Image: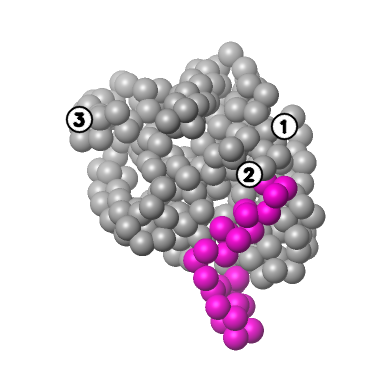
Amino acid sequence: MTEKIAVINQKGGVGKTTTAYNLASTLARYNKKVLLLDLDPQGNCSMALGIDSSTLKRTMSELFLNEVELKKAIRKTNVVNVSIVPSNLNLAMVETKLFQRDMKAPTDRLKEILSERYVSLFDYVIMDCPPSLGYLSLNALNVASSLIIPVQCEYFAIDALAQLLATITQIQRTSNPNLEIMGFLITMYDQRIKMNVDMLSNIRQDFKDKVFTCVIPRNVSIPMATLNALPVNYYKPSSMGSLSYLALAREVMEYVEKKHKN
């Protein structure tokens, strides 16, 4: 079965995009086939994999507007076993365009898109969500089977979780009862900073086994890899950044294997 994972948090700057494409790349190292969906109109996930989507005509936007088939919108990346449906700024106007055409803007549109048989060719679909709980994120929540929630060890990042968790609970009660939180992922962690250490302890105490064992450290190799349009395990395989995402991939695979056994 294809595991559909939404990487989500309405707080910006917590590492959603970085997590999405680096997780995809490390899962691919374990011979998993991964489809990335760039649901952020900024298109950073696409750019991080070396794709200039600004002038492309087969993107997430055209998919939502039913102007292109999924198979034709998927592009291969330079990372073996990782494909992507890119996005650009046109995606920000999708909801408005649907209303202008007297069409509904259903929050289960992405569910329809991913119901195509072609999706079963992939082991994982990873959705990089925008920093909001609007139309695009709601579509992701309605189709996802599990969620990865990146969290930075700072007060405002923690404070933003309350609204996200309330939205998740509402989705579980109404439109997607099978939705599960796979885990909270601590990102940009620096053990030299006392606040980071204290926040991590509080998060583990509050969410217990819903917090990934691995943490993603502040490591220069991660942003440098992005600058070079590469995942960190391609840019510097032996770095702490690369090893931490490999650890995350193992935890994700263990979670999915256990889930499907049950």
Residue 54, given in percent of the width and then of the height, sits at: 72, 58
Q: CA distance from mark 3 to mark 1?
A: 37 Å
What residue occupies the far front of the structure in this picture? 262
Does 91 appear above or below 193?
A: below
| Residue 81 tag number | 1
Q: State the residue position of label 3.
A: 205
The single residue placed furthest to the top in the displayed view is 238
Q: Give whichever of 40, 220 is nearer the camera.
A: 40
Q: Which residue is mark 2?
A: 36
Q: Nearer the viewer, residue 257 or 225?
A: 257
What range of the chain is rendered magenta?
Answer: 93-119
Identify the secondary structure beneath mark 2: strand
Residue drawn where x is 67% and y is 42% of the image: 120
Q: Is residue 200 above or below residue 42?
A: above
Name the spot of residue 86 as percent of width and height, x first. 68, 52
Work out which quarter of the rendered image holds the C terminus and state it: top left
Asked whether the beta carbons under mark 3 and mark 1 sit within 8 Å of each other, the answer is: no
Q: Secondary structure at mark 1?
A: loop
Secondary structure at numbered mark 3: helix
Give the residue type at disc 3.
Gln
